[in-house]
Amino acid sequence: MRHPDHDRLREEVRSWYRTPVLGYHVERRRFGSYRRHAEDPDSGLIIVDALTPAEVPEFLADASSYFDNRAVNIWLDNRDLDAKLGPALVAAGASMDSENCHLAHVGPRPEQVRRSDVTVEVVTPDTLLDYVMVKLKGFANSEDAPPAEDVEKELAVRRRELASIGRFLIARVGADAAAILGYYDGSDRLIFNLATRTPFRMRGIARDLLCEVVADSYEQGCRSVIINTDPNDTPIQWYRRLGFTDEVYWRRSYHWALRFR
């Protein structure tokens, strides 16, 4: 089932990564959009628009030069382009990374449930560390303390988002931060973080957070609510059952790091 504004949403989501936002600089060049954040020199990203397999060596040389020989991520957000260019990128030394898709919510609003043993709070600068720790532990499927470097990097990113269009929620069981959800606010809301720590899984906490944001999006008159996920990961089946059925954006990532010999 498709969203009533499917075509508009496809163009809208595609544009999010090709325009300056949240402090990212974007430059349109011959092969596509080159993107990085001034505060993070390792944030290099290229979204390819026009490239042939024969041009891949020239493209990678340009990428290395532009990003000062740092590693760079490459996105192909067209399946036909990926089928044509992916083998050439890998043959030239790039490594294939993950897929990602954006699904728009379609259909009835999911039921919103509030549990007596769970409280939900809006994240502030003072509680952002709690959010980051749940996110890192949940994504790692581990209760081990994440490396301090990862914590600081994640905090820096989320601080920038919190000062702009980023909105974050924490679900607590008693005093314990158990699950989190993050989204970008606007006429089209994008949910991009949803995680539960392993001791608190299988209780429906993340589902309740997601349903709360979807319900609030309808109440606020948002044009759409979109979730960002790996199409090969188990949660996508759960998202689809909750009404996220319309794929409005897809991409595959590649990683390129110049190898000095």
Image: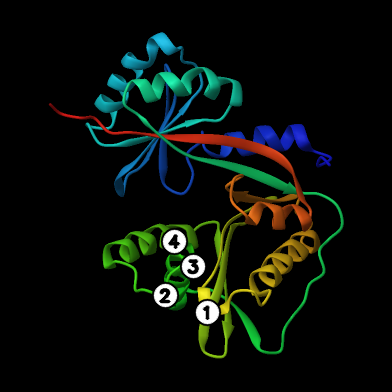
Of the pair 60 and 17, the residue shown nearer to us:
60
Q: Secondary structure at mark 3?
A: helix
Quadrant location of the C terminus?
Answer: top left
Specify whether 162 is left or right of 186.
Answer: left
Q: SS for tag 2?
A: loop
Indicate which disc residue 143 carries.
Answer: 2
Q: Quadrant of residue 160?
A: bottom left
Q: Earlier in the sequence, mark 1 or mark 2?
A: 2
Residue type at numbered disc 3: Gly
Q: Is 144 displayed left or right of 18 in the figure?
A: left
Crowdedness near tag 3: few (<14), some (14–19) or many (≥20) residues, C-alpha within 10 Å: many
Residue 83, picture quadrant = top right
Q: Nearer the viewer, residue 70 or 229?
A: 229
Picture colour scheme: rainbow
* Mark 4 or mark 3, earlier in chain: 3
Residue at the farthest top position: 54
Q: Which of the two residues, 96 or 101, is positioned nearer the viewer here?
A: 96
- Measured as percent of width and height from the top left, residue 220 is found at 76, 61
Q: Which residue is mark 3?
A: 138
What is the CA distance from the residue labelled 4 to the residue labelled 2?
Answer: 21 Å
Using the numbered discs, state the Cα–Cα distance from disc 3 to disc 2 in whole angstroms.
Answer: 8 Å
Q: Earlier in the sequence, mark 4 or mark 2?
A: 2
